Amino acid sequence: MVDVLNGLNAVLATIPSPDRGVWYLGPLPIRAYALCIIAGIIVAIWWGERRWVARGGIKGEVTDIAVWAVPFGLVGGRLYHVITDNQKYFGPGKDPLAALEIWNGGLGIWGAIALGGVGAWIACRRRGIPLPALADALAPGIVVAQAIGRLGNYFNQELYGGDTTLPWGLEIYRRVTPEGREDALAGVAIDHTPIQVVHPAFLYELLWNLGVALLIVWADRKFRLGHGRVFALYVAGYTAGRFWIELMRTDEATLVFGTRVNVFVSAVVFLGAVAYFVIARSRGGREDVAALRSTAEPVEAAEGEAPAKADVVEASDEGAEKKNSPESVKPE
């Protein structure tokens, strides 16, 4: 009886996995991973918009910039994943076209931030917005979006560590397709007897990211950080957690000197973020977004935007000059 109770307690103490990550609405697949990514993007834009307006920005600008940044970020994230995990898609018996199947999971945050930043920079240039100031406004929302995205890994039964007997161990089930083929992503768990109980690395990162969000919001309010320092603090905080979480993961990955490549990337990016955070301190406190906007030179004015004051004055001067010209004087 004692053994039965102990076994029951052990089962109840673990975290069950979802029995599937894909539902079908007729022939249309509804993927939990995609829904989590979309939810994260919505939260990042909503919170970023509020913070941007509070810092002196104009409502709607974050949404406009997201039109550029989000597609760039998705492409960059996928490219990074395919490059660093190329063994999954290229080689004997592999399907290179699977590299395009983003709905099956696989987005590298480093590529997403890098190429997403390029998209944001292009949009900022078009609207005359200082990118560092915008990045500071977006930083908390981005890291919360990453936390929400990690729930997609939970539904996909991926991103976990080695076996564990800890109370919060994650149960991994065998999923199969209707044809009986084993498929961890598209299959369904018929038998909920776990084949493994592992460290939920996705959950560790989710909680870490929420902690980073709280940290940077607190630091921003207390020290009125500016000039990209909030974003740098986010990057440093995130990479510090990603470093140790990568060390515990057991899924297949590209190795460098026997260590997962993202461990090295985390260390390098962390040092770069810390260096920027320290150097940017010399630029002073939080910048005045409105003042910076007036000195910026947008490549392309927004449709329907009022002409600049200088343009109005110039036009007035030209009108006055024309009015006083000999041709404008009527004979008496």
Image (cartoon, grey):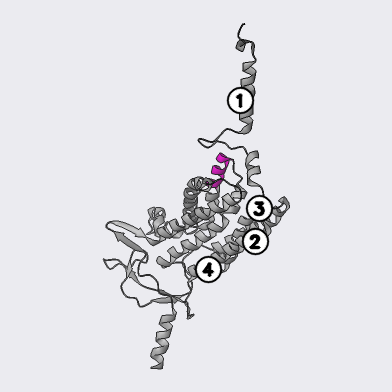
149, 198: nearer the viewer: 149
- Circle 2 packing at 10 Å, graded few (<14), some (14-19), many (20+), is few
Residue type indicated by callout 4: Leu
User: Do tag 2 and tag 4 residues touch (Cβ < 8 Å)?
Assistant: no
Residue 259 in sight in this render: no
Q: Relative to residue 313, is residue 111 depicted above or below?
A: below
Q: Which mark is residue 219?
A: 2
Residue tagged 3 = 226
* Distance (Cα) linking label 1 and label 2: 46 Å
* Distance (Cα) linking label 2 and label 4: 19 Å
Tell me if residue 121 is in the magenta stretch: yes
Q: Tell me which secondary structure the magenta stretch mostly adopts.
A: helix
Closest to the camera, between mark 1 and mark 2, is 1
Q: Residue at x 44, y 80 (%)?
A: 13
- Circle 1 packing at 10 Å, graded few (<14), some (14-19), many (20+), is few
The quadrant of the image that shows the C terminus is top right
- Magenta span: 118-128
Tell me if residue 36 is in the magenta stretch: no
- Residue farthest to the top, as pictured: 332
Q: Earlier in the sequence, mark 2 or mark 3?
A: 2
Q: Which mark is residue 207?
A: 4
> Helix, strand, or loop for circle 1?
helix
> Helix, strand, or loop for circle 2?
helix
Q: Residue at x 56, y 43 (%)?
A: 124
- The image shows residue 299 at horizontal and vertical percentages of 57, 36
Number of numbered discs on residues: 4
Q: Earlier in the sequence, mark 1 or mark 3?
A: 3
Residue type indicated by callout 2: Ala
